[in-house]
Image (cartoon, grey):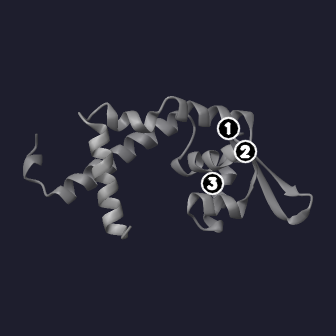
Amino acid sequence: MDGHESWALGRLLLVAARLVEREWNALLAERGLTHAGFLVLHVLDGGPRTQRELAAGTYVEEQTIRPVLDRLERDGHVTRRRDPADRRRVMVSRTERGGRAHAAVVTGDMAERIITDRVEDPEALRAELIRIITGIRGG
């Protein structure tokens, strides 16, 4: 087991998080998505949004969301149009293809299976992770 038994808990958690993230990113890549792109498609599940709303909904800066939208648009997952009510705003909509890509990830519960297929008590792990996160964040 490569001596993992002697690792500190923090190190184990960090390595596990990186490995889960790597597997998650590979699963998304098989569907032509990035993690950021998936988050955008997920926010768009509630209907068209402005670029500003998408940035806020995915917890990134507005300038960071642009390249994500560029790729999603190039790959046919979203469309961008000027808001007829306010030409300064750009509205982003999920296309049918984007909806299918999002559904393929969500319906298959891929993110959950990366973990649940490998642990004995997923709900206990969930509770402990929530306890860690809320303890560090202060609530």
Residue 61 located left or right of residue 93: left
Q: Which residue is mark 1?
A: 98
Residue 20 percent location from the top left of the image: 35, 44
> How many residues crowd mark 2 within 10 Å: few (<14), some (14–19), many (20+)?
many
- Quadrant where the image shows the C terminus: bottom left
Q: CA distance from mark 2 to mark 3?
A: 10 Å
Disc 2 and disc 3 in contact, CB within 8 angstroms: no
Residue at 61%, 45% (x, y): give it: 42
Q: Amino acid at mark 3?
A: Val
Q: Residue furthest right?
A: 84
Q: Amino acid at mark 2?
A: Val
Q: Which residue is mark 2?
A: 78
Q: Residue furthest bottom?
A: 138
Q: Which residue is mark 3?
A: 68
Q: CA distance from mark 3 to mark 1?
A: 13 Å
Residue 89 located left or right of residue 5: right
- Quadrant where the image shows the N terminus: top left
Per the image, label 1 sits on a secondary structure element best described as helix
Which is nearer the N-term, disc 2 or disc 1?
A: 2
Q: Is residue 18 above or below residue 76?
A: below
Q: Amino acid at mark 1?
A: Gly
Which is nearer the N-term, disc 2 or disc 3?
A: 3
Residue at 59%, 48% (x, y): give it: 37
